[in-house]
Amino acid sequence: MIDFGRVTFVKSAPTVKDKPGATLPEIVFVGRSNVGKSSLINALTGHVVAKVSSKPGKTVLLNYYNVDDKFYLVDAPGYGYTISGTRHVESFAAMMEDYFADNQSLKGVVFLIDARHAPSKDDCAFHEFLINRRLPYLVVYTKADKSNQKERAAFKSALEASNFARVPGIATSTVDRTGFDTLKARLGALLK
Ligand code: GDP
């Protein structure tokens, strides 16, 4: 189980070449913009490190946080939003291709999906990418507190029709901390 004792912001890297000099194992958090990534990082670590936004699509950098000098928690840019009519997905894909290419420090990907909406085309494409690259990953379904029973059933059917069907996921909520212990335990296992 991961303990988030001291969490410090190290740097924002516009490209992988700008990542911190010191090498530590890395866990990267990825998901579409507004999925609740910043909220989850803050609540999980118990530190206000990532900026929670009311407007989607603020993070366009890889943000590195040092956790107890044990690993870097890397906050990746959210994908799937539009800037002046141009979809951000191409630059996101290029950045992530770069990030994942031959990254020996990468121990796992925390892949966030909003539990209220069926996985989007971009979610399924990124999932395909993770599978093809054989990268170790966890799927986290965020904002679990927001759905009622009917919505949960609809979400489950949507998953069954997608490439998430056979992947066990962790439902989380920053409101009541659902799933936090499981997520911390799974992160610990990735880092072993
Ligand atoms: P990001 O763009 O992925 O970093 O998403 P944010 O963390 O900025 O969250 C987007 C919105 O969702 C904000 O209004 C958050 O308050 C809300 N949110 C995030 N996580 C949860 C959750 O677990 N429960 C509820 N009810 N709202 C959440």
Image (spheres, rainbow, N blue to C red):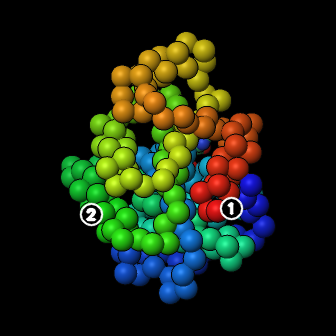
Residue in the image at 42% along x and 46% along y: 32
Q: Is residue 75 visible?
A: no
Residue in the image at 45% along x and 61% along y: 76
Which dot marks residue 48? 1
Q: Nearer the viewer, residue 77 or 139?
A: 139
Q: Is residue 186 left or right of residue 95?
A: right
The mark that comes first in sequence, 1 or 2, is 1
Residue 10 picture quarter: bottom right
Q: Nearer the viewer, residue 103 or 65?
A: 103
- SS type, badge 1: loop
Residue type at tag 2: Ala
Q: Is residue 44 left or right of residue 91?
A: right
Check disc 2 and report the residue beneath it. Answer: 94
Measured along the vertical axis of the image, is residue 29 above or below residue 24? above
Q: Quadrant of the N terminus?
A: bottom right
Q: Nearer the viewer, residue 4 or 109?
A: 109
Q: CA distance from mark 1 to mark 2?
A: 29 Å
Residue in the image at 36% along x and 22% along y: 161
